[in-house]
Image (tube, coloured by chain):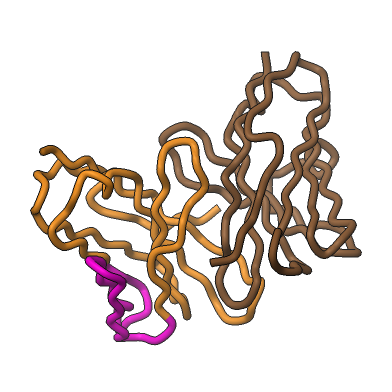
Amino acid sequence: GQQLNQSPQSMFIQEGEDVSMNCTSSSIFNTWLWYKQDPGEGPVLLIALYKAGELTSNGRLTAQFGITRKDSFLNISASIPSDVGIYFCAGQNTGTASKLTFGTGTRLQVTL
Amino acid sequence: GAVVSQHPSWVICKSGTSVKIECRSLDFQATTMFWYRQFPKQSLMLMATSNEGSKATYEQGVEKDKFLINHASLTLSTLTVTSAHPEDSSFYICSAYPQETQYFGPGTRLLVL
């Protein structure tokens, strides 16, 4: 099935640094979602974006829905060790109970 | 957020046996649930859409006779991996919709020997 391209694939950063990652698609989505997955667990929703151009924050996390509807980015400010994990973007089209298309994931590791 | 549970959290079985995995929505009703499979260091791939009271819809390339899905109530969907083989070893995750957003279960790790 289709997957969205995320970059970078992985990153090592120092505690306190800001992190930026993005997600691109060849097709349009009406909703963009960002999830974090810890090892051996299911993904947890971080931010949901419903409108092109929308910029939404959740604590130290900020995400934007690209105006072309084909991309989104996620920023994490002042990273801390518990930010370690895999971050997935997901695109969704209209209607509840609609399927998600997941990105390839960005693995984040934070060093002290 | 909404709570989705899975049982068991991990299972080891012999090749050729069948394994049933449960997905429950604990604090909401879900007419639709989704089943995903995730191989190590890879993303989640949708296997099928589970519909309460009707047949599941399978993604291309997923064998419906091998991965049996039953959504008998508004809070429970089950995935049965029939005649499991080592290549079926994976992390299986379900999700459900309370409103507009999917919430995921904690996953079930299957190891087929």
Locate the C terminus of chain B and report the quarter of the image it occupies: top right
Name the colour assigned to chain B in the rendering.
Answer: brown
- The residues colored magenta run A50-73
Residue nearest the observer in this picture, B95 or B7: B7
Q: Give the residue drawn at x 26%, y 69%.
A: A59
Rendered view: B9 above or below B4: above
Residue A63 location, x and y as percent? 28, 72
Residue A59 is covered by the magenta coloring: yes
Outermost residue toward the front in this view: B27
Q: Is residue A13 left or right of residue B43?
A: left
- Quarter of the figure with residue A70: bottom left
Q: Give the residue drawn at x 76%, y 69%.
A: B29
Residue B2 location, x and y as percent? 59, 65
Residue B90 location, x and y as percent? 59, 31
Rendered view: A79 above or below A41: below
Q: Give the residue drawn at x 41%, y 35%.
A: B41
Rendered view: A31 above or below B73: below
